[in-house]
Amino acid sequence: MTQKNWLQTFTRSSNDYWIGGVCGGLGEHTPVPSWTWRLLFALLFLFYGTGLLIYILLWIFVPPKSEPKDEK
């Protein structure tokens, strides 16, 4: 059995989010907490808007976390 790395299973968070769940998803899949990711994106936003661009691209291309289906 092969083990997938965190980039292959990376999804947006459905419970730790402010706008799109990107930072919450990064916090769930990396050892860095979500508040640190939010601070990093805010600081990058101050430098020519790159943080906003990266955040929007991640929001578009990273899939949301799928909820488990109820089996009846």
Image (cartoon, helix red, strand yellow):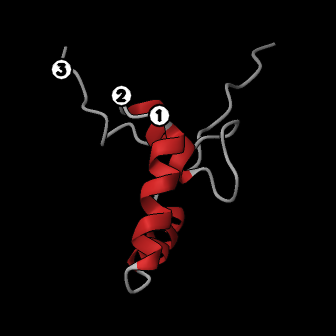
The residue wearing badge 1 is 33
Camera-side residue of 37 and 28: 37
Which quadrant does the N terminus fall into?
top left
Q: Picture quarter containing residue 49?
A: bottom left
Residue farthest to the bottom, as pictured: 48
Answer with left or right where residue 17 lies relative to residue 28: right
Residue farthest to the right, as pictured: 72
Q: Picture quarter containing residue 31?
A: top left
Q: Is residue 49 visible?
A: yes
The x and y percentages for residue 72 are 81, 13
Helix, strand or loop status at disc 1: loop
Q: Amino acid at mark 3?
A: Thr
The x and y percentages for residue 70 are 77, 20
State the CA–CA distance, disc 3 to disc 1: 27 Å
- Give me the residue at 54% from left, 42% from top: 35
CB-based contact (under 8 Å), mark 1 and mark 2: no
Answer with left or right where residue 1 lies relative to residue 33: left
- Give me the residue at 37% from left, 80% from top: 47
State the CA–CA distance, disc 2 to disc 3: 21 Å
Judge the density around disc 2: few (<14), some (14-19), many (≥20) Cα neighbours within 10 Å. Answer: few
Residue 33 vs 47, above or below: the answer is above
CB-based contact (under 8 Å), mark 2 and mark 3: no
Answer with left or right where residue 30 lies relative to residue 53: left
The residue wearing badge 2 is 31
The residue wearing badge 3 is 2
- The mark that comes first in sequence, 2 or 3, is 3
- The mark that comes first in sequence, 3 or 1, is 3
